[in-house]
Structures are given as structure tokens and as C-alpha cells.
Image (cartoon, rainbow, N blue to C red):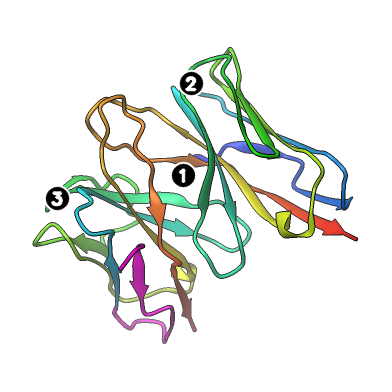
């Protein structure tokens, strides 16, 4: 099945550093989402974006919906050890009043060193 | 319960065995999804239910995979004659559709299937 391209695949950063990761698709989505997955758990939603060009923040996280509707990026500022995990982007063609499947990216594994 | 639960959490099967994976969605959630996550990959869509109706099964990899949700709540994903390539984490998610298409899918912890 289709998977979106995420980069980088993995990152090793020091506590306090800022992190950037992005996601690209060959097809258009009208909703972009960013999830975090911890070992042995399911993905947890971090940020949702619903409009091209939209910039949304959630605490130290900031994400943008690309104007072409084929890409998105996620920034994490001042990283802390609990930011460790795998970050996934996901695209969706959302329709009012009904649910729709997610197409996930390949994931970015984040390691934070003290 | 407060979240999506799945059972069993771990399953080891011999090649050729049938397995059944259970998902208990958040109470009242209309929509239920199954995803398959291979090692080191992102989840991939398998199938989608709205209440008891299976509206999309385009992601099921073969006719050995079958899912049901007979009463519109609990769902079971069944894999017949398991093969080694079926080894993966099987994730269930539930959601409640919103007017603007902004529903949030809440994921369970997954069932880790290993086929030997």
C-alpha cells in the first residue's frame, strides 16, 4: 500500500535542541495529521491540520500544512527526553459526516540524549 | 473503558493456523478501522466499519483476511491459514464522525502477531 515519504528516518539530538521533520506525498490530501508512537503502544494524535497553508501549534510542537497539499512539516522546540519515540505523518481525504482512512508516512525515529 | 482495547496483546501462531484478533472500541464510536503495521513501517489501512457495515475492505491483503463487527461495537479480525508474512502489529482505531470531517481516530495498543 501507499506510504508517505518522511525525512529524516532517524535523528539523534541533544536535550534542548529544536527538531524538524517533514512528510511528502505524490497525491493531495485535505487533512494532515501528526502522530507519536511509543514502544508497545498505538499512535497518539499530536496535531491536526485542515487547510492548506495552516500553521498550528500545540505546546512545543508546531506543524504546517503545505500549500500544495502534498506536504507537511513538524517542528519540536526545546526537546526533552520524553520526546523520544517514532513520529508519523498521516494524510486523509476527509468528508463531512463520515470517517475516512489514514495514509501514514514511513516514520521518523527520534532519540534525545542528555 | 476509557480507550480502545485489543486482545490478545501478543499472539504466536504456527504457519497454517487460524487466528482471531479482537477490538473493543470506545463506547459509542460509530467508526472502526483496522491497520497493519509491519516492523519499522507506518500503519497501513486494512478495513473500515461504520456501525456494523463494512464500507471499505480495499486494504485486506488477501481472502485469508476477514473482519466483522456484527453488532456495531466489538470487531474481530480473522486471519486464516497464517503465513510468515502476516507477522505484524494489528492496530484498531475508533472514531466519531464530525460535521467538518475532523474526526480523531483513537488507536488501541495493538496485537503483535508472530507467525513461525
| Quarter assignment of residue A37 | bottom right
Indicate yes or no whether the magenta region holds residue A69.
no
Indicate yes or no whether the magenta region holds residue B18.
yes
Where is residue B72 drawn, in percent x and y? 13, 57
Tell me the SS state at disc 3.
Answer: loop
Residue B51, disc: 3
Residue A87 against residue A48 in the figure, above or below: below
Q: Chain of mark 3?
A: B
Magenta range: B1-19
User: Could you say which is closer to the camera, residue A50 or residue B44?
Assistant: A50
Where is residue A5 drawn, in percent x and y? 64, 36
User: Disc 2 marks which residue?
Assistant: A28
Q: CA distance from mark 2 to mark 3?
A: 28 Å
Circle 3 packing at 10 Å, graded few (<14), some (14-19), many (20+), is some
Residue A1, disc: 1
Tell me the SS state at disc 2.
Answer: loop
Where is residue B83 drawn, in percent x and y? 42, 73
Residue A113 appears in the figure:
yes
The mark nearer the N terminus, 1 or 2, is 1
Q: Residue lying furthest front in this view?
A: A59
Amino acid at each position: 500500500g501507499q506510504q508517505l515519504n518522511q525525512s529524516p528516518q532517524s535523528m539523534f539530538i541533544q536535550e534542548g535542541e529544536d527538531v524538524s521533520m517533514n512528510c511528502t506525498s505524490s497525491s493531495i490530501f485535505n487533512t494532515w495529521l501528526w502522530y507519536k508512537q511509543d514502544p508497545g503502544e498505538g499512535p497518539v494524535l499530536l496535531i491536526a491540520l485542515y487547510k492548506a497553508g495552516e500553521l498550528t501549534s500545540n505546546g512545543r510542537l508546531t506543524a504546517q500544512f503545505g500549500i500544495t497539499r502534498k506536504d507537511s512539516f513538524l517542528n519540536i522546540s526545546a526537546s526533552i527526553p520524553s520526546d523520544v519515540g517514532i513520529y508519523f505523518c498521516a494524510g486523509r481525504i476527509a468528508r463531512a459526516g463520515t470517517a475516512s482512512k489514514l495514509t501514514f508516512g514511513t516514520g521518523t525515529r527520534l532519540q534525545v540524549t542528555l | 473503558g476509557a480507550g480502545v482495547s485489543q486482545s490478545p496483546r501478543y499472539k504466536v501462531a504456527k504457519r497454517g493456523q487460524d487466528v482471531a484478533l479482537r477490538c473493543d472500541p470506545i463506547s459509542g464510536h460509530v467508526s472502526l478501522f483496522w491497520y497493519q503495521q509491519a516492523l519499522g513501517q507506518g500503519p497501513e489501512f486494512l478495513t473500515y466499519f461504520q456501525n456494523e457495515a463494512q464500507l471499505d475492505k480495499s486494504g485486506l491483503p488477501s481472502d485469508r483476511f476477514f473482519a466483522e463487527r456484527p453488532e456495531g461495537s466489538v470487531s474481530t479480525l480473522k486471519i486464516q491459514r497464517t503465513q510468515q508474512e502476516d507477522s505484524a502489529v494489528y492496530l484498531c482505531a475508533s472514531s466519531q464522525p464530525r460535521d467538518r470531517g475532523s474526526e480523531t481516530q483513537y488507536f488501541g495498543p495493538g496485537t503483535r502477531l508472530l507467525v513461525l
